[in-house]
């Protein structure tokens, strides 16, 4: 669930991209990168592991010269946490091409094989984003022209769509030409276009969420359509074309449940409003099914569930309290790369206000339950703080299936709800009662803000994958590649390689 940004301006973009990445930091905390194009048509690149504020110091910002650039914050689902797999990626041929990507390709190995056989292009990392960049470069190279027309670029995007599968929102820069953004034919991952007027000229920006546009002073124009490509020349001319066959909008519903900021709007849906609707429907379900539950207080697990819990409390007529204090300088535990890190981070991230728990029957509200690690520890903390009974409500249904489109849920055996009913899950996380949102209620909560969205990617709940190309063999393969044990090995290998290179 990476965050991406691209700006074409009449003035230096380094600070605006930096500011935009800081408000997209929630989408990835593993690495960050920015590339700009300077006055001599050279890429200026800085990327490294760490948070945005750690990766970019004054010396780096000074070097990132140019009026056009792209940026990325990484949340790794494929490949490793090595800095070599941080984005942006670039290739020198053709023209000079750089790209950032949010999502996950489901045929990465096939692409790498094709690239080598057809074009002798070598992909140097395990990142599917590098494979995607080289596929695009391959088709741009087919143009055999010194200067690409918009039609040439859209042709290359059309060919790229036919080759790649999965979820992808991408922004690419072509030296001497411009910036192009495109989205997969299902619109699984978000991408939005903004503009602002400066000195009589129009400047443009692409980003994963509208909040990034707000920060940089751009007005929202519209979301990029599924399968669409939008090309902006470096002198500010905009071209757009539908480049996919039979596109249909099926966005990832987890954007609204967990990933996106509440002050963002994605595909015409206010994330905040959608979460309020989720709380309303879940509150009504609790009132209907737990009429005899002796709840004294409703407490959210901060911060994604705050708005949901407040609405539940209102419907139940119970006090809403902030029982946990969050350390804002610890990353989101869900998107940490290993189970051991997630476990150690929960206690550092949250602390209880004991008076809100002592001798009370507490309803804890969270956005979802994935592995159950965080939930179990939060329940233990509530017990230690003196809670008599603990009820638990999840704003999302049971997560039973792997995600293959860019969320770190790689193997069903790491999901606490896989093969289990709510009663069993309740025992495992240590609560007196447990309730989940119904899937129909969840989808209706988002559709209430935009009825034109007829379908969502809900594969983690249903096992139905909207791209239609996911087999049991594929799921078994990614489970082997991306479970926690495999991640630990890749992290160790990457560390050893970097130590060797430094030596």
Image (spheres, rainbow, N blue to C red):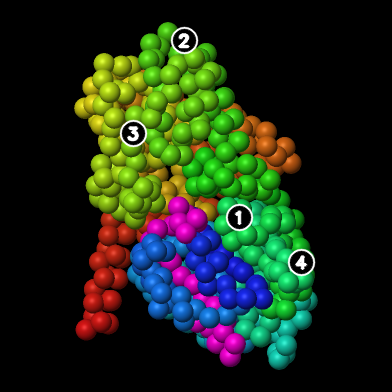
- Label 3 and label 1: CA atoms lie apart by 29 Å
* Segment tinted magenta in the rendering: 22-45
The label shown at residue 240 is 4
Q: Are marks 1 and 4 in contact (CB under 8 Å)?
A: no
Mark 2 Cα shell of 10 Å, populated few (<14), some (14-19), many (≥20): few
Instruction: Check the image and report above or below for 199 versus 242.
Output: below
Q: Is residue 439 above or below residue 121?
A: above
Is the residue 368 above or below the residue 471 in the image? Answer: above
Which percent across, then down, holds residue 495?
26, 71
Q: Quadrant of the C terminus?
A: bottom left
For marks 1 and 2, the one nearer the N-term is: 1
Cα distance in 3D space between marks 1 and 4: 23 Å
Q: Which residue is mark 3?
A: 324
**In-front residue for pair 343/328:** 328
Q: Which residue is mark 1?
A: 214
Q: Nearer the viewer, mark 3 or mark 1?
A: 1
Q: Nearer the viewer, mark 3 or mark 2?
A: 3
Question: Upstream in the sequence, badge 3 or badge 1?
Answer: 1
Whether residue 173 appears in this view of the structure is: no
Q: Nearer the viewer, mark 3 or mark 4?
A: 3
Mark 3–mark 2 distance (CA, rounded to whole Å): 26 Å
Q: CA–CA distance between discs 1 and 2?
A: 43 Å
Q: Describe the element under mark 1 as helix, strand or loop.
A: helix
Give the mark nearest the N terminus, 3 or 4.
4
Q: Nearer the viewer, residue 143 or 470?
A: 143
| Location of mark 2 (residue) | 291
- Disc 3 is placed on an element classified as strand
Q: Residue at x 50, y 56 (%)?
A: 24
């Amino acid at each position: 669930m990476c965050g991406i940004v691209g700006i074409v301006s009449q003035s230096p973009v380094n600070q605006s991209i930096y500011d935009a990445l800081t408000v997209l930091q929630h989408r990835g905390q593993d690495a960050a990168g920015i590339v700009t194009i300077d006055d001599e048509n050279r890429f200026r690149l800085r990327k490294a592991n760490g948070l945005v504020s750690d990766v970019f110091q004054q010396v780096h910002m000074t070097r990132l010269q140019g009026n056009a650039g792209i940026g990325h914050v990484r949340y790794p689902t494929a490949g490793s946490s090595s800095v070599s797999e941080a984005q942006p990626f670039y290739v020198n041929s053709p023209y000079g091409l750089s790209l950032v990507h949010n999502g996950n390709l489901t045929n990465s190995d096939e692409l790498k094989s094709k690239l080598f056989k057809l074009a002798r292009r070598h992909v140097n990392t395990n990142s599917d984003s590098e494979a995607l960049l080289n596929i695009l470069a391959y088709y741009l190279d087919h143009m055999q022209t010194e200067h690409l027309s918009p039609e040439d670029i859209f042709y290359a995007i059309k060919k790229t769509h036919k080759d790649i599968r999965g979820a992808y929102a991408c922004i690419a820069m072509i030296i001497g030409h411009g910036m192009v953004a495109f989205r997969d034919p299902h619109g699984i991952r978000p991408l939005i276009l903004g503009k602002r007027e400066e000195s009589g000229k129009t400047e443009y920006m692409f980003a994963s969420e509208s909040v990034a546009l707000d920060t940089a002073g751009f007005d929202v124009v519209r979301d990029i359509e599924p399968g669409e490509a939008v090309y902006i020349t470096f002198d500010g001319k905009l071209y757009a074309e539908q480049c996919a066959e039979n596109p249909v909008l099926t966005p990832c519903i987890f954007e609204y449940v967990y990933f996106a900021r509440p002050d963002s709007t994605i595909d015409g849906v206010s994330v905040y409003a959608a979460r309020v609707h989720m709380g309303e429907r879940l509150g009504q379900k609790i009132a209907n099914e737990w009429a005899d539950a002796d709840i004294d207080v409703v407490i959210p697990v901060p911060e994604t569930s705050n708005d949901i819990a407040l609405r539940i409390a209102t419907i139940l007529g119970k006090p809403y309290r902030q029982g946990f204090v969050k350390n804002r300088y610890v990353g989101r535990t869900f998107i940490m790369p290993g189970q051991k890190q997630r476990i150690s981070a929960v206690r550092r991230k949250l602390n209880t206000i004991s008076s809100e728990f002592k001798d009370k029957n507490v309803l804890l509200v969270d956005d979802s339950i994935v592995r159950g690690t965080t939930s179990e520890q939060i329940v233990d903390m509530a017990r230690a703080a003196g809670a008599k009974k603990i009820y638990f409500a999840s704003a999302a249904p049971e997560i039973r299936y792997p995600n293959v489109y860019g969320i770190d849920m790689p193997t069903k055996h790491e999901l606490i709800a896989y093969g289990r009913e709510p009663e069993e899950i309740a025992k495992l996380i240590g609560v007196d009662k447990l309730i989940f949102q119904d899937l129909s209620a969840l989808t209706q909560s988002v559709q209430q803000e935009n009825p034109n969205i007829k379908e969502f990617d809900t594969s983690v709940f249903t096992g139905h994958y909207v791209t239609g190309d996911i087999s049991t063999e594929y799921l078994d393969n990614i489970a082997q590649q991306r479970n926690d044990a495999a991640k630990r090995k890749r992290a160790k290998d990457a560390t050893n390689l970097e130590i060797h290179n430094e030596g």
